[in-house]
Amino acid sequence: MDPIRALLVDDEFLALQLVERFLLQAPDIVVTGKCRSALEAREKLKTGEVDLLFLDIQMPALSGTNLLKSLPNPPVTIFTTAYAEYAAEAFDLNAVDYLLKPFSMSRFQQALEKAREQLLLRGFSGRPPEEARDFMVVRADGAWRKVFYRDVIYIEGMKEYVRIHCRDQRLIILESLQNLESQLPAGQFLRVHKSYIVALKEVLSVKGYFLSLRQGGRELPISRGKRREVLKLTFDEFR
């Protein structure tokens, strides 16, 4: 398996050294770059060769939070900062953890474990991207589970949790709907509402701003801006 590629971003040299030293205890992670500013990091991130980002917040010219907001497909991110007041904003940006300086090795390892779980959820396996999988891996009821895309009917967002409705089971996982959406294969799933993602093959009919699903006749709402896209992707006559 290829290693997890980490980028370290902090304007303090000693902080960069500390994170790098802690990462020497993680054989599955390799540091591919160290940046002293968010502007420098933004250039490195354009290569798409970063899986895990360790990011300070207060830096000159561009803050860590504003850097993350500017990225269309951000890597899994752990914030490392001396300021507790930015925690809520960091988690709103889907950071997997928020390390408050000075942090211990044990606390750092806890954050790493969260990052590994998130990478696994996103499908990271060290394989080339062209080797597409027909399933995703989620953690539910204390166990790692394969969820095959063909079995998913729709996915429901519930604040910090999501409920995955499959043909033969329902799974509740600790994840944001936005993060899960980014892992689903394009063309098979569509976010039709702020709280719902549907498998397009399961859509039976559309009436007004509601769609009906084949299984059980369940109706789900459609956002006003998504109705035309649902029709185009689901029914040939609207292509």
Image (cartoon, rainbow, N blue to C red):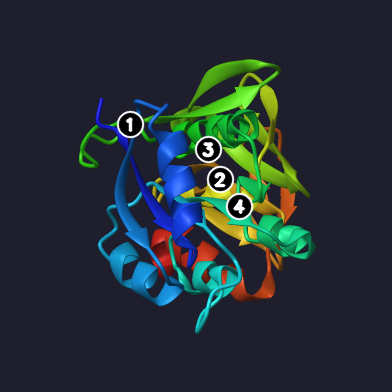
Query: Alpha-carbon distance for marks 3 and 2?
Result: 15 Å
Q: Quadrant of the N terminus?
A: top left
Residue type at mark 4 is Ala
Badge 3, how many Cα within 10 Å: few under 14, some, many 20+? many
**For the residues bearing labels 4 and 2, Cβ distance under 8 angstroms:** no
**For the residues bearing labels 2 and 1, Cβ distance under 8 angstroms:** no
Nearest the viewer among 136 and 58 is 58
Residue type at mark 2 is Leu
Q: Which mark is residue 115?
A: 3
Residue 163 in the image: state x and y as whole percent.
71, 36
Q: Secondary structure at mark 1?
A: loop
- Residue at the image position 71 percent from the left and 68 percent from the top: 208
**For the residues bearing labels 1 and 4, Cβ distance under 8 angstroms:** no
Badge 4, how many Cα within 10 Å: few under 14, some, many 20+? many
Q: Which residue is mark 1?
A: 133
Nearest the viewer among 224 and 38 is 38
Q: Secondary structure at mark 2?
A: helix
Q: Which residue is mark 4?
A: 95
N-terminal of the two: label 1 or label 4?
A: 4
Q: Which residue is mark 2?
A: 180
